[in-house]
Amino acid sequence: MNRVIEGLAGKFQVFRLNLRRILSGAVARNALSLYSIRFANYILPLITVPYLVRVLGAEEYGLLGFAQGLVAYFSVFVDYGFDWSATRMISVGRDDPESVSRTAMAVWGAKFILLSVSIILLFPVTVLVTKVRTAAALVWIVFASLAGKVLFPTWLYQGLERMTGIAIINISVRSAGLIALILFVKQPKDLLLCAWILTIQSFLAGIFGVGWATFRLKIRWSMPSVSDIWGSLKNGLALFLSASATTLYTSGNAFLLGMLVGDFSTVGYYVAAERLVRAAIDALGPISQAFFPKVANLAHASKDLALREGRRILRVLAPLGAGIFVFTFALAPEIVRIVFGTKFMPSVNVVRILSLCIPNVALATIWSTLMMLSFKRDYAVLIILFLAGILNIALALLLAPIWGANGMATGVVMAETFVNAASFIYTLKHGLNPARFRPAYVRNS
């Protein structure tokens, strides 16, 4: 028994020391800033959920989730993987202000072109698809929020490791949006007003984000060349395709479920559960996002140093992911009752099923995002995510018509498990797995 206690104490000491290393220096400040952005993007909206599900009801809330799920596909198209590819480009050239400004102009130019194409693509969807046509006004209002996403330069601040400014912007704008929702959205017929408030806050965040970049980061505005825009698109192609594949088993599930089941109440139960679990998963995200520029630079200089850093992060993310999973699974009934109310108790099983994604995402983030992308194995990530997306759609078509929201959730978990397993095997096979990394002094002893 004493040996067990000593062993657990030793593991906790390792976890504490690695956490202390992670929570030091500029990377820690960026991680905290990213947490505040995630707080603004996910936790603040989650605070409004108990209110919105009560005033809108399951059906209207499901309809909102359905529209947001459709727009999520266009959001991925507009983002084009720039949150990772542009971050990597800016991180490498951040000591050259001219290079940073040139990259920023190219990325913004590419995003505006992609937004224009998205408008053209959405129009026939809202006319020809019956379920979408009945909610066309709502879909277009939600779609308008993409203008804010085009403007908001998370990739720029992340690459420069200057996240504090946009953290302040995000929290301020989204807090104001939260207050507006509570003040003006009072009943189910206020659904369109609710969507407008969410869209306006996204646009304001984008405007302030651009302003901060211009006046505080001294970004020089100029007309990007066609070759620069094309270069940014080419550089981000693999990551865009990866993000598109990811959407097949993450953001677009509410839309897919809405197309497969007969009522939007089922979609509402699923969306509520998904957002709750995604908020838990996003508690892990800022660590990987904050460390990505550092690990990418280390990978460029030394494979051993990058793997050493990955091992430290793994020793923090793995136990955190396991702990959040146990907490979410065990307390799902109480969490749903408090957050959504008794009318949303059908979401409990969905929460428990989706909570299995938490440890899978925690580990897959290390294998795929930090290691494979840092070592520029973009197309390997693409293949894994594309296969996971196809698996998710196939399982949704099979399970959702039978088990509804529970079937959709089961397909998502199996897709996330596939990503985790495939990424682990790839990094293991190619010597990029930090779990198997042995420092040089150990290998040579």
Image (tube, rainbow, N blue to C red):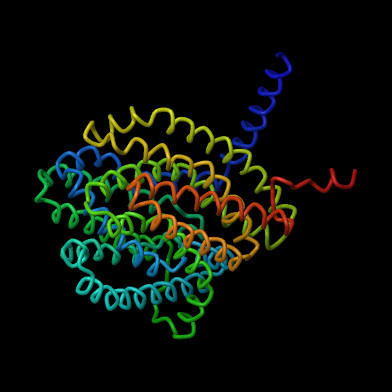
Which quadrant: the C terminus?
top right
Tell me where residue 135 appears, x and y as whole percent: 17, 62
Snapshot quadrant of residue 76: bottom left
Residue at image position (36%, 62%) is 152
Q: Residue furthest top?
A: 2
Q: Would residue 298 be found to the left or right of residue 190 on screen?
A: right
Q: Residue furthest bottom?
A: 226
- Seen in the picture, residue 231 relative to 259 is either above or below; the reply is below
Q: Would residue 109 be found to the left or right of residue 141 on screen?
A: right
Q: Residue furthest right?
A: 445
Tell me where residue 148 appears, x and y as whole percent: 30, 63
Residue at image position (36%, 65%) is 73
Residue at image position (40%, 76%) is 110
Counting the numbered discs, the total is: 0
Tell me where residue 303 appears, x and y as whole percent: 73, 57
Tell which of 395 and 99 is nearer to you.
395
Tell me where residue 430 appears, x and y as whole percent: 73, 59
- Seen in the picture, residue 107 relative to 152 is either above or below; the reply is below
Residue at image position (74%, 17%) is 3
Which quadrant: the N terminus?
top right
